[in-house]
Image: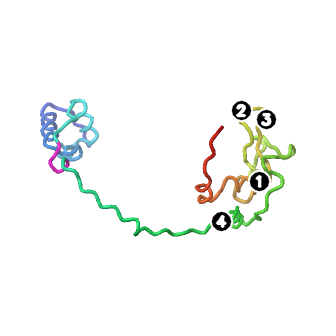
Amino acid sequence: MTVMSWTDDRVEQLKKLWESGLSASQIAAELGNITRNAVIGKVHRLGLSGRAKSPSSAAPRQRKAARPAQHMMRISRPVSRGNTALAHAFDVEAEPDPIAYDNVVPMSQRLSLLELNESTCHWPVGDPGSADFFFCGGKALNALPYCAHHSRVAYQPASDRRRAAPRPIK
């Protein structure tokens, strides 16, 4: 495509087409060898952004009537009990992990970023800016970056997340 410059004739043609209500794409096609974006840019540089509304767009549109509430049907979904859905999905027991329960991680298990690998839990504990920051370091589940306890915390079913109301910070 050859680049055409904005000659006086092309600018006058652009103004007429714009005032007649054509879109930038239609004007670009009419002028030829020019993009829609070039038309939009020139329109703004010329200050042509305001134009008369066409009669069809000036009339308010009819809105669809809302469906009455009695036509809506609620479908209940199975509710998972605790974290058994996660346990079944990853083929692990739903028992609490005694090592990493409540962020009480033994000193011997704690790892730095450089000590992590695919078989260790990558759950961060504490403030990354402090010297006390560490990662859980427990035995990670297959195909997951976390141990059993932290997987249950990280991967909660959406229905459980919606039910839990956010607690105000005091």
What is the distance, in whole Å, between disc 4 and disc 1 at their CAs? 28 Å
Q: Residue at x 80, y 51 (%)?
A: 100
How far is mark 2 from mark 3, CA to CA?
A: 9 Å
Amino acid on which the number 1 mark rests in the picture = Ser
54 in the magenta segment: yes
Query: Which residue of the protein is positioned furthest toward the right in this rendering?
Result: 108
Q: What is the x, y in percent for residue 37?
A: 29, 40
Q: Is residue 92 left or right of residue 60?
A: right
Q: Which numbered disc flags the more N-terminal residue, 4 or 1? A: 4
Q: Quadrant of residue 143?
A: bottom right
- Tell me the crowding category of disc 1: few under 14, some 14 to 19, or many 20 or more residues within 10 angstroms, Cα based: some
Residue 129 — which label?
2
Which residue corresponds to mark 1?
119
CB within 8 Å, label 2 to label 4? no
Of label 1 and label 3, which has the lower sequence position?
Answer: 1
User: Tags 4 and 1 in contact by the CB under 8 Å rule?
Assistant: no
Residue wearing tag 3: 132
Amino acid on which disc 4 is placed: Ser
Residue 134 occupies quadrant? top right
Q: Earlier in the sequence, mark 3 or mark 4?
A: 4
- The quarter in which the C terminus is drawn is top right
**Which residues lie in the magenta part?**
53-57
